[in-house]
Amino acid sequence: MWLVQPIRLLIFLGVCVVIIGMFLEVTEARGLMKQQSQNTKRRQSMLGRKRKAMNKKSKQMKKQKSRQRNKKQPARPKPPKAKAPDNTKISVYKCPSEAVEMNCLSCRTKVYRKCPIAGATKITRVQVMKEYPSSYEKCNVGRRENFGIEDDSNIWVNYGCRAKFLVCYEKGKHEPKTINCMCTTSKHKCPTGLQGIRLNIDIKVTILWSFGTQKCREGQNWGYNKDDIWVDHGCSATFRVLW
């Protein structure tokens, strides 16, 4: 019996030592965890300060750039106005008889266009009054002729000549007539309506518009006299009769 009490005392002391050791381990672990959390907080605060400083710097840089952009630049001198070409202002010729101002435009290069003058029996003069800036080439005569007179009652343009023309012409004594004459399969005649009028009148017929299958050529597939106009070989057109 005398040995039981010391053994119990030793067991009690061992249990107390184990409990004290466990308590010490727990407290040490808590201290380590607290220290780690403090370290992480410090790191986060340092990172936050760095970010704020970087944001502040970037804002300052943006402000400086915006100020530099907003600075007034010296005004550039305006270029002098281009002078109009010499051929746009031409001295106007005074026609001795009838005169008309009209536009005749060749839309693209090497495009032929005919512009009829109503009531003209003979065109005596054609002059360029104003050449448009959209003209592909200068309207001129000579080696590169790109406007002129055709059939005594039409003016023509070609090679991109675009201008306003002054046309001097002689007018017929009577109002001109317009007649449509179409060729179907064989030679066809269209009366002029001048039958019964005295024989010594002067008559002239010109083409306003051609709409046949063949190009109308005077003396070949069309012609006229006082009484009628004849067409043949696919010539169909609107004719103007001056007398």
Image (cartoon, rainbow, N blue to C red):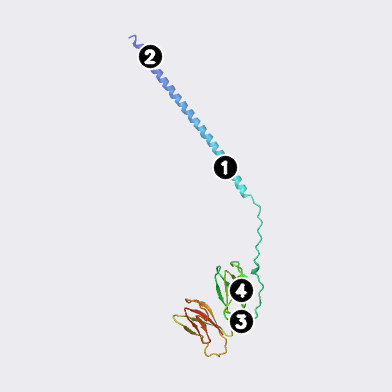
User: Which of disc 1 and disc 4 is earlier in sequence?
Assistant: 1
Residue at mark 1: 58
Instruction: Tell me residue 152's x, y (percent).
Output: 58, 79
Distance from disc 4 to disc 3, alpha carbons, whole Å, reads 16 Å
Residue beneath the point at 55% across and 39% down: 52
User: Which of disc 2 and disc 3 is earlier in sequence?
Assistant: 2
- Which dot marks residue 170? 3
Q: Nearer the viewer, residue 190 or 83?
A: 190
Instruction: Tell me residue 166's x, y (percent).
Output: 62, 75
Quadrant of the frame with the C terminus: bottom right
Callout 3: SS: strand
Distance from disc 4 to disc 1, alpha carbons, whole Å, reads 68 Å
Distance from disc 1 to disc 2, alpha carbons, whole Å, reads 72 Å
Q: Nearer the viewer, mark 3 or mark 1?
A: 3
Residue at mark 2: 10
Instruction: Tell me residue 22's x, y (percent).
Output: 41, 22
Distance from disc 3 to disc 1, alpha carbons, whole Å, reads 84 Å
Q: Nearer the viewer, residue 56 or 158?
A: 158
Instruction: Tell me residue 72's x, y (percent).
Output: 64, 51
Q: Is residue 80 above or below residue 89?
A: above
Callout 2: SS: helix
Could you tell me the amino acid type at mark 2? Leu
Distance from disc 3 to disc 2, alpha carbons, whole Å, reads 152 Å
User: Which of disc 1 and disc 3 is earlier in sequence?
Assistant: 1
